[in-house]
Image (cartoon, rainbow, N blue to C red):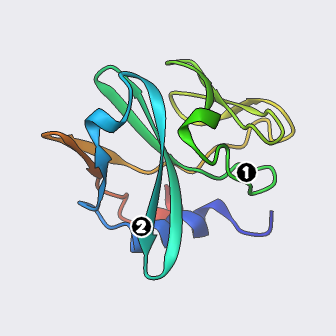
Amino acid sequence: MNVHRGDIRASLASELPAGTFICRLDEVPPTGGHVVRLLRGGIEISLIVLRQHETVRCFLNRCPHLGSELARQDRHLYFEPGVSIECNVHYAVFRWADGVCVRGDCRGESLTGVPVTVAGEGIRVGEWPRDAKDA
């Protein structure tokens, strides 16, 4: 891909500032995932929110191999709860905990993470590192 991950993070940080509502906690199964589409400035941003009971993680729904979405809908999410998530386009496997590709053409690369916080019944964007390019 021609776009650097640091540039993607910096763009996400400006489009999804801390506090931006992502989804309700109950929209994500206790040991599962949920595809979320947010419209920001006329641009759709697709995210995957993963939950393992009290632990919630979020990644840009974009495979580093070809830039395609890992899944278009919840029913297309392939995962082993708490262990891995798989791209349903070319089947690269990413660690649940940090998004690093452990099998496939993009091995060693990773999904772009989005910091999240759970406040009440909602999941919101958390605090981005001061310089998102260095994250």
Q: Residue at point 12% right, 40% down?
A: 120
Sooner in the amino-acid sequence: mark 2 or mark 1: 2
The answer to whether 81 is drawn above or below residue 69 in the figure is: above
Q: Which residue is mark 1?
A: 64
Q: Is residue 88 left or right of residue 114?
A: right
Q: Is residue 119 left or right of residue 77?
A: left
For badge 2, the amino acid type reads: Ala
In the picture, the quarter occupied by the N terminus is bottom right
Q: Residue at point 57% right, 51% down?
A: 112
Q: Position of residue 70 (x, y in %)?
A: 67, 44
Q: Nearer the viewer, residue 52 or 42?
A: 42
Residue at the far bottom: name it.
41
The answer to whether 79 is drawn above or below residue 58 in the figure is: above
Q: Position of residue 79 (x, y in %)?
A: 61, 24
Q: Position of residue 83 (x, y in %)?
A: 56, 18
Kind of element beneath mark 2:
helix
User: Label 2 to label 1, Cα distance in Å?
Assistant: 18 Å
Crowding at label 1, few (<14), some or many (≥20) Cα neighbours within 10 Å?
many
Q: Residue at point 80% right, 49% down?
A: 65
Kind of element beneath mark 1:
loop
For badge 1, the amino acid type reads: Pro
Q: Residue at point 44% right, 70% down?
A: 39
The answer to whether 109 is drawn above or below residue 45 in the figure is: above
Q: Which residue is mark 2?
A: 13
Residue at the far left: name it.
120
Q: Position of residue 52 (x, y in %)?
A: 39, 21
Q: Nearer the viewer, residue 14 or 52?
A: 52
